Structure formats: C-alpha cells, structure tokens
Image (cartoon, coloured by chain):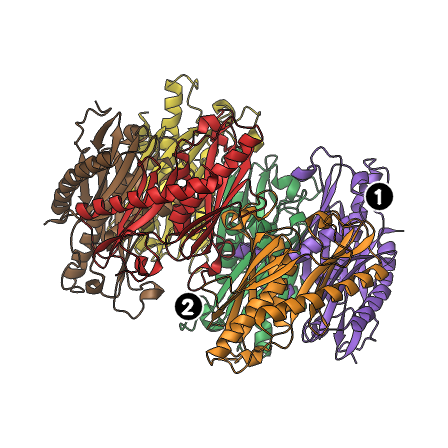
Chain colours: A orange, B red, C brown, D purple, E yellow, F green
Amino acid sequence: MRPSGRTFDQLRAIALEPGFSKHAEGSCLAKFGDTHVLCTASVEDRVPPFLRNTGKGWVTAEYGMLPRSTHSRTDREAAKGKQSGRTHEIQRLIGRSLRAVTDLVAMGEMQIKIDCDVLQADGGTRTASITGAWVALHLAFQKLVAEGKLAAVPLIDHVAAISCGIFEGTAVLDLDYPEDSNAQADANFVLTGSGGIVEVQGTAEERPFTRAQFAELMELAEKGVTELVAHQKRAVGL
Amino acid sequence: MRPSGRTFDQLRAIALEPGFSKHAEGSCLAKFGDTHVLCTASVEDRVPPFLRNTGKGWVTAEYGMLPRSTHSRTDREAAKGKQSGRTHEIQRLIGRSLRAVTDLVAMGEMQIKIDCDVLQADGGTRTASITGAWVALHLAFQKLVAEGKLAAVPLIDHVAAISCGIFEGTAVLDLDYPEDSNAQADANFVLTGSGGIVEVQGTAEERPFTRAQFAELMELAEKGVTELVAHQKRAVGL
Amino acid sequence: MRPSGRTFDQLRAIALEPGFSKHAEGSCLAKFGDTHVLCTASVEDRVPPFLRNTGKGWVTAEYGMLPRSTHSRTDREAAKGKQSGRTHEIQRLIGRSLRAVTDLVAMGEMQIKIDCDVLQADGGTRTASITGAWVALHLAFQKLVAEGKLAAVPLIDHVAAISCGIFEGTAVLDLDYPEDSNAQADANFVLTGSGGIVEVQGTAEERPFTRAQFAELMELAEKGVTELVAHQKRAVGL
Amino acid sequence: MRPSGRTFDQLRAIALEPGFSKHAEGSCLAKFGDTHVLCTASVEDRVPPFLRNTGKGWVTAEYGMLPRSTHSRTDREAAKGKQSGRTHEIQRLIGRSLRAVTDLVAMGEMQIKIDCDVLQADGGTRTASITGAWVALHLAFQKLVAEGKLAAVPLIDHVAAISCGIFEGTAVLDLDYPEDSNAQADANFVLTGSGGIVEVQGTAEERPFTRAQFAELMELAEKGVTELVAHQKRAVGL
Amino acid sequence: MRPSGRTFDQLRAIALEPGFSKHAEGSCLAKFGDTHVLCTASVEDRVPPFLRNTGKGWVTAEYGMLPRSTHSRTDREAAKGKQSGRTHEIQRLIGRSLRAVTDLVAMGEMQIKIDCDVLQADGGTRTASITGAWVALHLAFQKLVAEGKLAAVPLIDHVAAISCGIFEGTAVLDLDYPEDSNAQADANFVLTGSGGIVEVQGTAEERPFTRAQFAELMELAEKGVTELVAHQKRAVGL
Amino acid sequence: MRPSGRTFDQLRAIALEPGFSKHAEGSCLAKFGDTHVLCTASVEDRVPPFLRNTGKGWVTAEYGMLPRSTHSRTDREAAKGKQSGRTHEIQRLIGRSLRAVTDLVAMGEMQIKIDCDVLQADGGTRTASITGAWVALHLAFQKLVAEGKLAAVPLIDHVAAISCGIFEGTAVLDLDYPEDSNAQADANFVLTGSGGIVEVQGTAEERPFTRAQFAELMELAEKGVTELVAHQKRAVGL
C-alpha cells in the first residue's frame, strides 16, 4: 500500500496549466500532486558563441527551488553565491531532454531559455520540470509561428519524464516525497511521445537493483509518460 | 489620465491570499494588480550570533525575482553567483520594516526568515513584498500561539507599504510598471497601522521634487496604507 | 544637550579639501568632524554598454571603508570577496545623487567614476561622501574645460547631503556616531543648491516617527545643506 | 569497424596500478587506454555534520581534470573560481557508487575522501575514476585493518563502471574519445561484482534509443564490468 | 642622472606620521616621497585556530590600494570579488616581515592585524608599508604596555624595507615609479635594525643581473634601512 | 648530517621526463626526489589584450597541487572557489622566470600557457616546476619549428631553479620537506644557464640571516643549477 493510497501504476493528480506567466513567450505551471513547478520559455536573439553564424538554434534550461518550497527551508542559492551540484545536474538534464526533440536547424539562429522554478516540492521536481517545460517551449514556438517568425513548430516529438522506484519491495510509478525518501532504488525516465528513450538515470539507494527490476521500472515509466503526453496535448491545444 | 485608467488615488486590485504554501509556517501570495509576490515565513530555532543567549528573537528577509517575472528575462542571481545591489537594498528594507513592528523580546529566542519571491513583476514589488510579508509573519506567529509556543502574537502593529510618484505632473498612488518607468519622481512609504512612518525612500528621477510635492505623496500613501491594512486584517482573520 | 556640545541645528566642523590626490582628475578630502572621506573622480573614455553610441555620458560611484576606519576593525570586503548590502546601498545612492545634477548629454560620451573611501568614520559617511564627491566631480569637469575637452562644466546645480534624526526626543542636525547609534529615528536628505529634493531615506529605529517630526527633520536638513553648499563653492572656487 | 580496431565488445587496455602515491592511505592510477586517472583515498577523523555521533562513516569524492589532460586546454577550475556542472555531476556519481558497496556502519565514524584527478583524457574518465577509486578505497581500508583500526575491510562488494554506446549503428563497449564524440547514444553503467545495478545514466545524443538497444548496452556492460572486477582483484591482492 | 634629481644612494623624502587614525590602537601614515600608505594596527583577542591555547600570539597583515591611488584608476578588489596575486604576495610579505622581529611568546595569546592601505602610489608601496607597519605595531604594543596588559614591548628589533634597482645601468636606492617601470632589475630588501636579512626578493625585468650587481644593491639597501630605522625611532619616541 | 643522507651540496635524484602528456605541445614530468610535477605547455593563438596587434608573444603559467599530493590532504582549490596566496605567488614566479629567457618578439603573436601540477610533494615544488616548465616550453617551441611555424626556438638561455637553506646551522642545497619545515632560513634561486640571476626569494624563518650566509646559499645554488641545466639539455636533446 502506498502512503498516498495510489495503486502501484497510478500517477498523482496531474495539471499542466498553460499561460501562467504574463510576460513569458510560453509558460506552464506543472503540478504533479503537491509538486508545483513554474516553467517559462524566453526567446532570445543571441545564441551561445559556439553557434554564432551557423544558422542553428539552441534550447537551454535553468532550475531553481524557492527557499521554502521544501519541508524545511533550504538556503537560497543566490545568497550562498553558488548553485549546488544537484541544481547543475537537473538543469543540464532538462536542457538535454528538450534539445533531443527540437529541430535546432529548423528553429534557426535563436535561443530559448527555459526556467523551471519549484514553487512547492513534494518529490519529482525534475520530472515535473521536463514535462512542463515541453509545454512552455511548445507555446513559445506557437507564438513565433503566429507572429510569422517560424513556419512551423520545430518540435519533432513530445518529451516527458517520470520517476519510478522500488518502494517496500514493489515497483511503483511517480514517487512522491514520502516514497522517494524511503525508496530502495529509483530511476528517472525521460521518454518521447513515440516511446524512445532520451535519458535514463537510475540510482540504487539501499541496495543494487537487478536487471529485471530495472525493466519493470521502465515499463511503468512508459505507461506514465503516455498519460503525461496526453496532458501535454491538451495543454497546447493539439 | 493614468495608463491603467485608475484615478490618482486608487490602488490596483489588491489580493492577499493566505496559506499559499503547503510547507511554510506562514505564507501569503500578495497581488498588487499584475505584481505577484509569494511571501513565506519560516520559523527557525537558531538566532544570529549577536543575539545568542539574549532571550531576544529576530526577523530577517530575503528577496528574489524569478528570471522571467520581468518583461524581458533577467539573469538568475544564483547563476551569476551574486545578488545585485537592488536585491540587497530591498531585502534589508523588508527586514527592517517588519522588525519595527515586532516585539523581539516577546517573541523569545527564535528567528523567522521571510522569503519574498516575485513570481510576476509589474511595478511595486517591494511594497507588495512588505505588505504580504506582514501577513505571512502574522500567520506564522498565530501557528506558534496555536501550538502553545507563544502566549500571544508579538506584533505591535501592522506594517504595509505603497509607492507614490509624480506621473505627468500629478501625484499618483501605487505606481505600476508603465508609470514607474516614466515617473518624474517616486517614493516608497512604509507605514504602520496607526500611521507612523517606518521607512521613507524618495528618489527624484528626472528632476528634484519640492517639499510640497513630497507632502502630497505622503498623504496619498497614508490613504493607500489604510486600505492595505484592511486587506491584511481580512487575510489573517482579525 | 548633544554629546558633542553642539546646538540642535549645528553642523560639525566641515572641511572640503580640494586636490588631495596627485593622480585623480578631481579629488576632495571631505571632513564632517571626525568623519573623513577621500573622494576622487576618474575620467574614462568608455561608457557602460547601454550608453554606447548615444552621445550621452555617465557618472557612477563606488564606496568603501578602510578596515580600521571604524571603532573596532571591520573585515576587509576585498578579503571576504564581496561587498556588503550596506556598501551597495550607499554607492548606488551616491551615483544617483550626482547624476541628478549632471547634464549627461552635455558631458558627452565619457564616464566619470567617483570613489568615496572612508579613512575615518564617526557617523554620516554617506552624507560626507556625496558632499565631497560633488567637489571632486566639479574639479574633474573644470580640468576637462581647461583642457578644452568640454565647453562648460555640465553641472546643473549643487548637490549635498546631511543626516538628521530624533535624538533624546529632539530633532538634531548632522548626527555623529554617538548620536546615530542611539537615535530613535534618522533620515538622510540629499538636496540641491536650489532646495529641491533628490533623495530622502528615513528609517525609524526604535519607534515610528510622525509626519510632523519628519517635516521638522527636513527643515533642519535644508539649513544644513545651505551651509554645505557654501563650503562647496569655496572648495571649487566659485 | 571501430577507429581503434577493437571488436564491439572489447575493452581498451586496462591497468590499475596500486600505490601510485607516496602519501595517500590508498591510491591507484587507473588506465583505460589513453585515459589516465589518479585516484587517492584519504582517511579523515571528522565526518560531515549530519553524521556526528551516529557511529557511521562516510565516503565522498572529488573530481578534477588537469587543464591539459584534454585535446585542447581546458580552463583551470580553481582559476575560474568554480567547478562546472559536469564536475559536480561526476563527483557526486563517484561518491554514490562507492557508498553503495560500503558498509558505513562497519567502517565506524570516519570519513574517506576520494580524489579522482584526470592526468590524461581520452573518453570514459568517470568510469575509470569509479573503477580505480574502488581500488584506492580498498587499499586504504586494508591499511586501516593492518593498523588494527578496523577488524575487516568494510566493503560489501566490488563496484566498477563502463560506458557503452551506439556507434555507427552498433552497440559497442568502452567508448574512447573518437567514438564518444560521434556516438548516437551512450550510457554509463555502474555495476557491482555480483551484477547488481548501482547507477545507470543513459543519454541519447542524436536520436532517442529503443528499449531493445538499451538492453543490448546493458549486456555489454555486464561483460565489461566482469573483466574490470578481475583487474580490481589483482590490484588489491584478492 | 635620476628623474627626480636624487643621487644614486639617496632616499626620497621620508615621513612616518604616528597616530594618523583616531580609532586604531597604533597607526602611522608612511610617506616615501609621493607614496603614501596608511598603516593601522588592530588588537584582537582571538588568535587563529592553529594557535588556540598555545599562549602564543600572532601578527598578520592585509594590504590594499585605493582605486585611484594609481596613475590611472585600478578596479576595486572588493567590487571584483577577489584580491589579485600581487596583493596576496605583498600582504604575506608584510606579515612575515613583522613576525620575524616579534616575540610571539612574549606577546601572549592575542592577535594584531596590520592594515596597509595605499592612499597614493608612486613606487615602493610594499617597502613603505613594512616600514610604517612596524611603527603602527610598536605604538599598539606601547598602548598595551601603558594599559598594563603587557610588561614590555615584545619587539626584538626594528624591521624596515627598501627597494633598489639597476636603472640605466646604475644601482640606485629607493626606486620611484618612473624608475621602477624602467628598471632593468629591482629587488626589495627587508632588513632588521641590526642588519640581518629577513626577506629578499629580486626580479630581473629586462635581463638577468649578476652576483656582483646583487651585492651592490644589498649594500645600498643597508644604507637605506639604517636611515629608515632612525625615522622609526623618532616616530615611536625612542 | 641531512635526514636523507645527502651531502650538503648534493641534489636529490633528478629526472626530467619529456613527452609525459599525449595531448600537450610540450610536456615534462619533473622529479626532484619524491617531488613530482607535471609540466605542460599549451600553444594558443590568442594573446592577452594588452599585446594584441603588437606582434609580441606571451608566456604565462598556472600552478596547482593535487589534493593528496601533500602529506595530509589539502582542500581542493577548485572546490573552495579560490586559489591561495601561495598559489598566486608561485604561478607568477614561474611565468616571470620563463619570460626572462624567452624572446617574446621572436616568438610572434601567440601565447604559451604552462601548467605545473604537483602530483606528489616533498619540498621544492616551485623549483621543480620552473625547471620542468623550461623543458615543456622548449619542446613546444621545437614542435612549432618542426611544423614550420617558427624559424628557431626563441629561447635565449636556460632557466632553472633550486632552493637552498640553513639547516641545523649549515647551508645545504635542494631542501626536501623534512629540511624545509625545519630550516632556519631558505631561499629560492632562479638562475639562467649562463649564471645570471632571474629571481631570488629569501625568507628568514626563525631568525634573520647574514649577508655572508646569503652569499653561501647563492654559491650552492649556482652549483645546483649547473647540474639541472645539464639535465634539461638531455631532456630536450641538446
């Protein structure tokens, strides 16, 4: 029995609210249960130096947590003067995940910066970030299409993410904080709409897991991502 | 005529939503029109070194803006590795304002950290921060009273803040971004519920202002703060 | 009775010594009693990026305290690797104050950097900084005029600053350290030669102050600045 | 055909040279072909704060690259004043991998710091780091056993790591730099001596990979780690 | 012929003005011609961790230049967020030089921090710093003796410093900026009152110098330090 | 008797192993007994800003110690976020030493960055760094000559370095760690192949040393450098 009463393969209540931000070209408030992440997409003319004059675009991401998004207050990274290793890890993951489904040539020489800021955390902030970021990115591209700056949305596929883990001996989908902090092993899967694997990060916490367990987690993830993709479609009006 | 159609002494639509955050001991989403600031109050056992073993408490504040809370994206302070002078200025102002109405002896040796994070900015983020922070602080104190850790809420008075300025030659209340960026002079007033002055910060932008103009702004501020205090009362159930 | 024996509306002994520095284009050692601030003005060809090719100039300021300018030694900011919030606040204030009386168009595309370094502190370092900085700036402009690089000194007016406060229930002018650290409230006023308000920063320390008290402080400030402006005139030979 | 002429399931020449450092309690120069990583283990009395007085130990890791370990020179992180996101990612991975096979209770309240410094890089520096770090850690524990400070080496199992990837459409083992920079997808596998999964990190570079491909990579990794474990046994004299 | 008209073995006009600072326990404004350094000595109760409970004291130094002490403005180290290599070099040199003549046991468990801040630079700032710092340190010790906190001034000897160099083929004493920036080689000598060598730092700029030249410079230095020691005696009233 | 059994004027076992690094244009593993420093030379097109369009080249150096190169582990500078004063001192010394024997005009507008990384420390790391760096630099220049990018190696002379000190009352050559940490005084000499002095840094540790002692140390250094130069010749094939 899961602490939340969910079945082993049940997602938390998912909401992807488009247009949360007045200023951003695209935005989405992604809610995975009590985990709430504000994702915004900002269009910029300048690409990073290594892409200048190549005609190619870039998508990158930054991630942060509000100090009191967590159970007890976490020190503000801006006040400490540096971002943690965990923050670096997550924002690089978000960026790679989105680039894997973006046609960087078709988008042309521009950059889109995704900001994923966790307003409230209850486990799974990186998976909510990726899932919501795709919506924000799509909306920003739609806006550019509407303005005649792009011919079509240069996204090849959906990308969404979910965590799975072994909790009290059972493989379960979409870990919340009480599960995550007691899981024996957990893995984050970033998958495309067509089921391809973009990123996999599995970590054994208490003891190593087996290849069979890992396959079980991946299967759960495929189910979860299929549902998340349906939410994404609704959010962007597809 | 003001860009928003408001009269010269009219506040924007104000909302002080208590309990926005699941984890914080006290929280408030403060909305001054399109300016939205999430204020949380976190109770901590440890006081700063200069107060150890004095029996006195402390209230301090931190301030931040989400990168895309602004019209065009602002660099993330955590990524740059330092907070701007403006951030330092504002968070010091919030802390001083709250301490001015807190009975630090009555609260006993504990610390409350206020975080004011701007989700969306449209002018007046520091005034919305102070006004919402008072609500978050009050709610945290109420919780401590409910838990029997404090005998009574150790707040001597309300404190709220509003900006006023000279826009197109006229003194107006509660500047929004289009006004703020074109004002000839503007001032932020932090006042108590009983009308006392806690902080005043006036800045001439285009040309110096006169003592008479300054008095006019202060009068507008008193009207505005009276209304804000009424909102605060409702938010904390007084 | 004030600790120093001064009357309520009496400035400390003021000295504005021009030409203290051999290298700077303009310089002034500003003494407000035992508060000594070395102000230098450095002319640079390059303007900040946002002004390039606009034909407009810029005036900016930096502020620092020598570690043992204070009663007990203060840590060196360069050694700590960052400037305090107080330093940021003060240097931004100095810069804004000077720009308010500078004709940035008339000065043309160049930048003047003001450095205000406190050699000895006894209260009122920011007001001595602003008052002395105007002298340093004027001298630097005079030098540019003498060299034929400017047609006239592009300063529209004087700017000078003074602090006032409520000390033992009475409004007094030009707080020194013993007064400042025991004042019930204090305010810094930055005024022009013609009496306009450029900046006002009032802070209640112990208890809020009233509108009447605030008006009283402003009146004292006007008297004080009138005297400071006379000192400035002598220092620059007007 | 692989650039190096290796078969698809062939490791590079592996050497794990124990005792490379005169001072460290344990050390190993790990060579995976032209990738050379110096791994040292340093025993310290103090554990991190969260473990004080728990009787439990800790193993942590730091990672660095010499500036000219790479094809073209990389800026020195100490000179830049911060470690990159990649460095953070890798050193966290090394630490987690080692802790997964360490009996932290049996080792008692002490800390072992692993330093993995890349002297020369040719792909796979993180996998060589983990594989060599286990040897350094084992040697440090052996020394503590020899000194009578521990009853037995508190390592539950081996841990070793290898990368696999899809290169020109084929799954291959132990990518070197020319393969790594052209792989369509690659994954790092951290496995125990008994075949359990400790960490998996898979990343699609050009296009998503399929579940079948991923299984193929995992199988290759199991073969590779089996060979690495044999090298580890020889290096520590088992 | 030297640019200043001095003879080859002539110091610049030297002035060591004691008591320049109102707050510091000891202070000295050291002038070597147009090079002016403010040296203060601050007594602190706490010693660095490695000396706690040893009964021994410590003397350390920090060094800084005001931004416009130099011919053209130098960036403020506090604003850049780090001290330059040159600053580190110089402040370590000052500290070592003073400790070489201090009886750290006799001074007991306390720390004296020396701050050397360059108000105006014209070559030889480090030698003026050391020479003035000895005066500030002596005065601070005298004050502690007068207050009954020390039985006697725990200084074993004088220490003073001077630079010498090869300028236009000739060995000269006490380089000023025009000489320093054109010298073929220069060396800084830190000597005691009794002629012992505490520190020597010689650097060939244009071409290596010979052993004979080096001996010639050392002889000049001995002459210069003898004169500086006489100035020190007068400054501290010996 | 020296701890190592060496005679007073005997170097440790010296080895200068060229070509240690696969990627660097020039490299050398310099061994002075148990002190091992990896020196690499990296050729870059870009010169520092102050040399652009002057036709002149530049040689600069960086220095670092692996955390466990030392007897007990030293914190990693990249993790602390800043380089120590000692590191700054040493890398500036290496750079100046090499530039003293390089014909910067003949090398043309390019930059060579020397990295000296201490793999194992046992005293004398800066002297091993300079001696090995010259070899790495020479090899890099040889490569540029072989590629036709330079007509001849633009090195005017050898440069090598050695430390000498007063150990138990006797002047000895090439201090190792046990000597260095107990020396009464020590000095580092950087000399050219033809015997010229490039840099001298002498420091009295316990008590000042005399001019006669200093001359004795210099004589020892000349002997030592003569031998080091012979090693350099063999390493670069002269």
Q: Is residue B127 above or below residue D71?
A: above
Q: Is residue A8 above or below residue E20?
A: below
Q: Is residue B121 left or right of residue F44?
A: left
Q: Which is more foreground, mark 2 or mark 1?
A: 1
- Circle 2 Cα neighbour tier, 10 Å, few/some/many (<14 / 14–19 / ≥20): some
Q: Which mark is residue F51?
A: 2
**In the image, farthest residue toward the bottom:** A151
Q: Is D206 in front, or is D139?
A: D206
Quadrant location, the C terminus of chain B = top left
What residue lies at 61% left-to-right and 41% top-to-bottom? F180
What residue lies at 68% left-to-right and 56% top-to-bottom? A12
**In the image, farthest residue toward the right:** D238
Give amino acid for label 1. Val
Q: Secondary structure under badge 2?
A: helix
Q: Position of residue C132 (x, y in %)?
A: 22, 45
Q: Position of residue C87 (x, y in %)?
A: 37, 45
Residue at the disc numbered 1: D153
